[in-house]
Amino acid sequence: MAKKSAVNRNLMVRKLVKQYASKRDALKAIANDDNRPLEERFEARLKLAALPRNSSKVRIRNRCDITGRPRAYYRTFKMSRIALRDLGSAGQIPGLVKSSW
């Protein structure tokens, strides 16, 4: 089980990303538009830099929903390899069969 502080920090980052997503997208569109004047684009970059760092989408860490483990994460199932194997062996994931050869 991962530290609760790390899991809670990641939840806070997800909340901030959702809160600032529209504002960040609008500022990025202005800053990357070559048809706008240079001063306006620079002003948009400054406003973008003034936003909280944790409101950036790249700050989100994929974590297992069950254990909070940050490594070996399967996006399809939203869980780590260990939790996936445990639930798969218990037959709780439809269509998942443990292979043996």
Image (cartoon, helix red, strand yellow):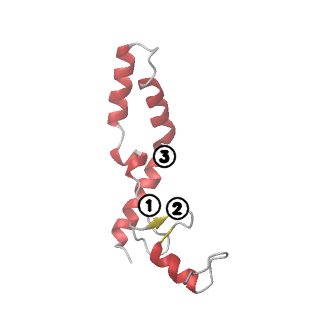
The answer to the question of whether label 3 and label 2 lie on touching residues, with beta carbons closer than 8 A, is no
* Residue 5 image point, x, y percent: 34, 68
Residue at point 35%, 43% (across, down): 52
Measured along the vertical axis of the image, is residue 39 above or below residue 47?
A: above
Query: Is residue 50 rendered to the left or right of residue 30?
Result: left
- Mark 1 or 2: the one toward you: 2
The answer to the question of whether label 1 and label 2 lie on touching residues, with beta carbons closer than 8 A, is yes
Q: Which mark is residue 93?
A: none
Amino acid type shown at disc 2? Arg
First along the sequence among labels 3 and 1: 3
Query: Is residue 87 rendered to the left or right of residue 62?
Result: right
First along the sequence among labels 1 and 2: 1
First along the sequence among labels 3 and 2: 3
Residue holding disc 1: 62
Residue holding disc 3: 19
Q: Which mark is residue 75?
A: 2
Amino acid type shown at disc 1? Asn
Amino acid type shown at disc 3? Gln
Q: Residue furthest bottom?
A: 90
Local secondary structure at mark 2 = loop
Residue at point 40%, 60% (across, down): 10
